[in-house]
Image (cartoon, grey):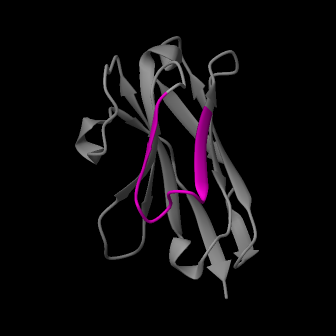
Amino acid sequence: QVQLVESGGGLVQAGTSLRHSCAASGRAFSASVMGWFRQVPGKERDFVAAICRSGSVTAYADSVKDRFTISRDNAKNTVYLRMNSLKPEDTAVYYCAADQWAANLERARGAYDYWGQGTQVTVSS
């Protein structure tokens, strides 16, 4: 089992940057594809980014590509989401997720086995 604890949310101005961290417990972190999702009230939880087990391959939603960067440190059991040039439409609760034993990057939230508690990011204009 994998437990995920997120940190790094907050209130920021448009155009600034923020970095999320997600620390995982358990020995299966390095065997898990990791993803970030976000959700606004009344809408579905949407894919943001994913990273393969080694960290060599990543995938992004079109809305965040070239602004957000996902990375991981398997020695620290931590995955990161660096968010640059933030926009008001990036306001959401952000969740990290683990797709344990996965071989491929997945964008579907149903593919992920474990979820963090979520952290609020609010971007003011």
Magenta stretch: residue 52 in it?
no
Q: Quadrant of residue 42?
A: bottom left
Magenta stretch?
A: 57-71
- Which residue shows up at 61% across the image and 30% down it? 72
**Viewer-closest of 125 and 55:** 55
- Which residue shows up at 31% across the image and 19% down it? 103
Residue 76 location in percent, x, y?
A: 70, 21
Q: Quadrant of residue 78?
A: top right
Count the marks.
Answer: 0
Q: Is residue 67 left or right of residue 108?
A: right
- Which residue shows up at 58% across the image and 22% down it? 25
Outermost residue on the front side: it is 66
Residue 45 location in percent, x, y?
A: 34, 60
Q: Quadrant of the C terminus?
A: bottom right
Residue 106 location in percent, x, y?
A: 30, 37
Residue 22 vertical position relative to residue 1 in the rendered view, above or below = below
Q: Quadrant of the N terminus?
A: top left
Q: Quadrant of residue 67?
A: bottom right
Residue 1 vertical position relative to residue 95 in the rendered view, above or below = above
Magenta stretch: residue 64 in it?
yes
Whether residue 17 is visible, yes or no, is yes
Whether residue 1 is visible, yes or no, is no
**Viewer-closest of 67 and 18:** 67
**Viewer-closest of 10 and 117:** 10
- Which residue shows up at 61% across the image and 44% down it? 6
**Viewer-closest of 41 and 20:** 20
Residue 5 vertical position relative to residue 119 in the rendered view, above or below = above
